[in-house]
Amino acid sequence: MPPTTGQMALLMISVLFFAAAGAMAVARLWGGNLKMQAAMQLCVSLGMGMALGVLVWHAQLRGRWIPLDDNFDALIWMGLLLAMFMIYVQRRKPLGGLELFIIPIVLVLLIGAAYFGKSNPHPYLADTWSWVHRVTSYVGAVAFAFAGVAGAMYIIAAQRLRNKSPLAGQMGSLERLEHLTMVSVTLGFALLTVGLVTGVVKMFAAGQDTPTSKIILACAVWVVYAIVLHSPMNPSFRGRKVAVLSVVGFVLMIGTIVTVMLLPGGQS
């Protein structure tokens, strides 16, 4: 079922909190203090709380509590998972500038949920096979989003080091960014493999003889990240090349998600 006006309003409040957190993250580059850091974290927490409230409200009205039940739920869940991943990393071992990359993606996901949920709402299949397919695909997409962010940060940090920029060290070491990229890719690749296999089985079960655009794009993403994942076997294929491929893979993943959202019923 499409979101109600109240749910849309609550989602927009969440967007405003994340936007405020993003503005504070930018301001911190020019001399922020601990109070601004605390305010940014508070805005992120409030934004997550509002988004979670939307999910609970939406589930209560439709009478089903299964996550990722429709495209509105799916995009909000992706935004929440990405925000939680960011909070986890920053509390374990803070990485300077991470919020500048993560928060804009969260904003795009939440705004996308509002747009697609209202203008092109569609449910997903409720059987177990479809549920496994959706969960592995979307959680894998979140991991790839994190890998894409880490890759972009690596590229920028490497460029700053070459130019001897005074802000070169604010994004963490290149070694840590590369490690974060590989860890995220490893998790995302495993989940995408499960999602791709279940998606292909669903395609044949539905009587489709030719791959859909969704399957083709997902296979392209799989190939890109397979190359990234096996890059340690070739010492010459590391660093910036891996970072660039992780960003390319994330762009392809976004294309896959948009294709799913635009297709009628999200199943073709």
Image: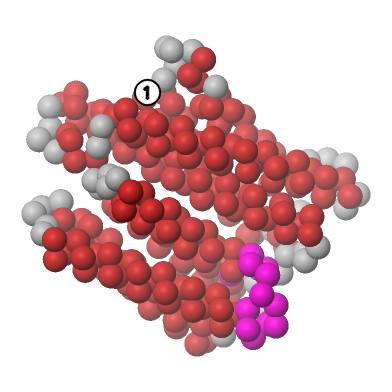
* Residue 90 coordinates in the image, percent (x, y): 31, 51
* Residue 50 coordinates in the image, percent (x, y): 43, 77
- Give the number of marks: 1
Three-letter residue code for mark 1: Gly
Considering depth in this image, is 133 or 123 the residue closer to the camera? 133
In the rendered image, is residue 223 in sight?
yes
In the rendered image, is residue 255 in sight?
no
Q: Which residue is drawn at 45% across and 83% down?
A: 9
In this rendering, is residue 267 above or below 57? above
In this rendering, is residue 195 above or below 40? above
* Residue 170 coordinates in the image, percent (x, y): 19, 41
Considering depth in this image, is 51 or 5 the residue closer to the camera? 51
Going by the image, does 167 lie left or right of 103? left
Q: What stretch is highlighted in magenta?
A: 59-72
Considering depth in this image, is 55 or 159 the residue closer to the camera? 55
- Assign a secondary structure to mark 1: loop
- Mark 1, residue position: 239
Q: Residue at x 31, y 38 (%)?
A: 153
